[in-house]
Image (cartoon, helix red, strand yellow):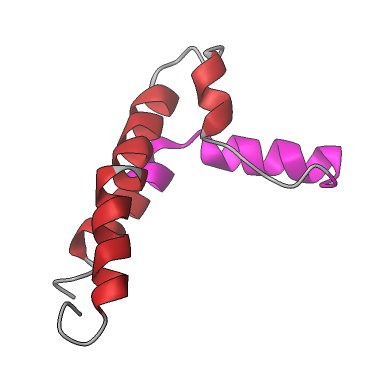
């Protein structure tokens, strides 16, 4: 990637520095039994026009720390795979 797509590699480094760290933080937040933290709202995002049922479904799925752990694992192993 570094040789063929330097911009992609640069974007990956930025993602590693910010996005991946944010996902790890979200995994830690949703692993806690109390989901009242205002920070957790930044972890679960969806368009404003989603129906209440769709929002509730996405939120329920997103509060599974395994979701974030899987995203982190995928991101960390992307270059190797």
Q: Residue at x 74, y 47 (%)?
A: 47
Q: Quadrant of the N terminus?
A: bottom left
Res 29 seen here: yes
Quick check: 5 above or below 31? Answer: below
At which x and y percent is residue 30?
44, 27
At which x and y percent is residue 14?
29, 52
Main SS class of the magenta portion in the image: helix
Where on the picture, by quarter, is residue 75? Answer: bottom left
For the residue pair 75 and 33, the one nearer the viewer reads as 75
- Left or right: residue 78 compared with residue 37: left
Q: Residue at x 32, y 53 (%)?
A: 15
Give the residues drawn in magenta, as a range. 49-69
Which residue is most to the bottom?
Answer: 4
For the residue pair 15 and 42, the one nearer the viewer reads as 15
For the residue pair 52 and 48, the one nearer the viewer reads as 48
Res 73 seen here: no
Q: Residue at x 36, y 37 (%)?
A: 22
Q: Is residue 29 magenta?
A: no
Q: Residue at x 40, y 36 (%)?
A: 65
Image label count: 0
Q: Quadrant of the C terminus?
A: bottom left
- Left or right: residue 53 compared with residue 21: right
Where on the picture, by quarter, is residue 24? Answer: top left
At which x and y percent is residue 77?
19, 63
- Left or right: residue 45 compared with residue 71: right
At which x and y percent is residue 4?
22, 87
Where on the picture, by quarter, is residue 29? Answer: top left
- Left or right: residue 56 compared with residue 13: right
């Amino acid at each position: 990637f570094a040789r063929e797509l330097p911009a992609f590699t640069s974007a990956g480094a930025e993602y590693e520095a910010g996005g991946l760290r944010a996902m790890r933080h979200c995994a830690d937040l949703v692993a806690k039994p109390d989901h009242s933290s205002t920070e957790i709202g930044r972890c679960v995002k969806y368009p404003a026009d989603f129906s209440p049922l769709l929002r509730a479904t996405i939120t329920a799925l997103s509060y599974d720390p395994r979701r974030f752990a899987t995203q982190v694992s995928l991101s960390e192993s992307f270059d190797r795979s």
